[in-house]
Amino acid sequence: MDKELKYAVFGAGSWATAIVKMLCENLDEIGWYMRSVYTKEHLLKEQHNPSYLSSVEFDTDKLKLSNDINEIASYADVLIFVIPSAFIYGELQKLTVDITDKTIVSAVKGIIPESGLLVGEHFHDVYKTPFENIAVIAGPCHAEEVALERLSYLTISCADQEKAQAIADKLSSNYIKTKISDDVIGTEYAVMLKNIYAIAAGIAHGLGYGDNFQSVLMSNAIREMKRFIKKVHKMKRNINNSAYLGDLLVTGYSVFSRNRMFGNMVGKGYTVKSAQMEMNMVAEGYYATNSAYLLNQKNEKKTNMPIIDAVYAILYQNKNPKKVFKKLTEKLD
């Protein structure tokens, strides 16, 4: 990949803001699409995102900001999408420019609910993006810690390893270490699934289960993830790598995890709707639970997924969390 390629980020949440911060370490100009006119104007005036990671100050001379998705899509060669999965379909509907030859990078961490597809698959099917032009950003990396410049690790997956390395280089810094992988589908499913397991960890905490049970839950979760990913995309991978296990652990245990926070509220007795309203951020795991459950139901030979089934029963079938987890404890080992 040519060093002169232009990069752009789509989305204005905490993870999008963190990725723009990483790119600012290595690039002189970054395109940044955000839906909110207020956010754009505030950023230009005050040098920070008013709603997310507001401690991060930007050199606005480096930012090409726009509320027009087509302007930023036309500008850049590498398009990094960080719009929550619940909203990305609607945003992509606004795209009219041809993006066939551009490199698409997914940092969405979820399945597109309207199509039931991973972000990469959606771009391949709808926008005819070749699979070798699709990459995924994964790894145990909370936006809040990027803002604090705490050492973090990312995995960039792409079938074209040269492209993966070029993207990794643009995200690397003294506080971001990167590695590359060719398991695009596996890592994209992993970043989606770990959010469901984080909700489970949160529910368990909210119900009063302790650290001993949490460790058993996480141990079972990584095995469940391995079974699920193997079923949808069989290839040689080490599920204990940081893109899979590391990401699962940080999302399941960290105080920064919005999915764990959401689960914790549900475990404490909040309804799903009231927990969602209380949070000002999207818990991707809520949508991922439905997608993963339905995907497994479609399989002729279903994968054994007791944790995902339990979370689905609580979030979508209005089952009592206490009773569901009581049954789940009998299925874990």
Image (cartoon, helix red, strand yellow):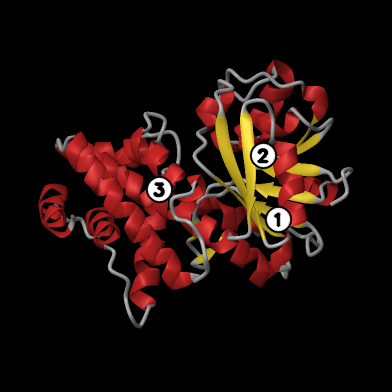
Question: Does 307 appear above or below 67?
Answer: below
Residue 140 seen in the figure? yes
* Inter-mark Cα distance, 3 to 2: 24 Å
Q: In the rendered view, does 23 fall on the left or right side of 223?
A: right
Q: Give the residue drawn at x 81%, y 27%.
A: 62
Q: Give the residue drawn at x 16%, y 38%.
A: 209
Whether residues under marks 1 and 3 lie with C-beta atoms below 8 angstroms apart, the answer is no
Q: Nearer the viewer, mark 3 or mark 2?
A: 3
* Inter-mark Cα distance, 2 to 1: 17 Å
Circle 2: residue type:
Met
Residue at image mark 1: 104
The answer to which quarter of the image holds residue 23 is top right
Give coordinates of residue 288: x percent, y percent: 41, 56
Q: Give the residue drawn at x 38%, y 58%.
A: 225
The answer to which quarter of the image holds residue 181 is bottom right
Instruction: Tell me which numbered mark, 1 or 3, is placed earlier along the sequence.
Output: 1
Residue at image mark 2: 34
Judge by depth and name the residue closer to the eye, 214 or 276.
Answer: 214
Give coordinates of residue 53: x percent, y percent: 56, 25
Question: Does 243 appear above or below 93?
Answer: above
Circle 1: residue type:
Ile
Whether residues under marks 3 and 2 lie with C-beta atoms below 8 angstroms apart, the answer is no
